[in-house]
Amino acid sequence: MANTPHTLQDEFPHQVEQIHALKLSDSHFAKLLDQYDTLNDKVHRAETNIEPMDSLAETELRKQRALVKDEIARMLSAVA
């Protein structure tokens, strides 16, 4: 989705090359990236009322996105 905030490039601007390398070498990491992008798109669609949802569901999506982001950050720091 164009102009979606909180992309991984925004969240980890100094690790874009590392993200790309891990994506190619680690299938679990690649799945996490896809999961993050899907959740981030859902949050963005909810926030912009493209696909409105109740606040509890939106909060749950944000929590899921944060958990995936934390796992991505953990994996990035493990190879740094």
Image (tube, helix red, strand yellow):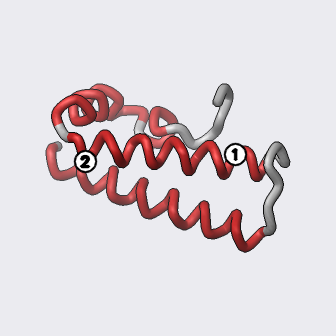
Q: In this view, does 72 lie to the left or right of 35?
A: left
Q: Name the residue tied to disc 2.
A: 28
Which quadrant of the figure contains the N terminus?
top right
Q: Which of 12 and 33 is in front in this view?
A: 33
Q: In this view, does 43 lie above or below 21?
A: below
At a point 55% along the width and 66% down the height, the residue shown is 63
How far from the left and from the top, in percent, is residue 42?
65, 49
User: Residue most toward the bottom?
Assistant: 56
What residue type is disc 2 on?
His
What residue type is disc 1 on?
His
Q: Which of 15 and 34 is in front in this view?
A: 34
Badge 1: residue crowd in 10 Å (few <14, some 14–19, many ≥20): many
Q: Name the residue tied to disc 1.
A: 44
The tag earlier along the polypeptide, 2 or 1, is 2
Q: What element carries label 2?
A: helix
Picture quadrant where residue 70 is located: bottom left
How far from the left and from the top, in percent, is residue 62?
60, 61
**Could you tell me how far apart the alpha carbons at marks 2 and 1 are, in whole angstroms?**
24 Å
Question: Which mark lies nearer to you, 2 or 1?
Answer: 2
Q: Nearer the viewer, residue 11 or 30?
A: 30
Q: In this view, does 59 lie above or below 71?
A: below
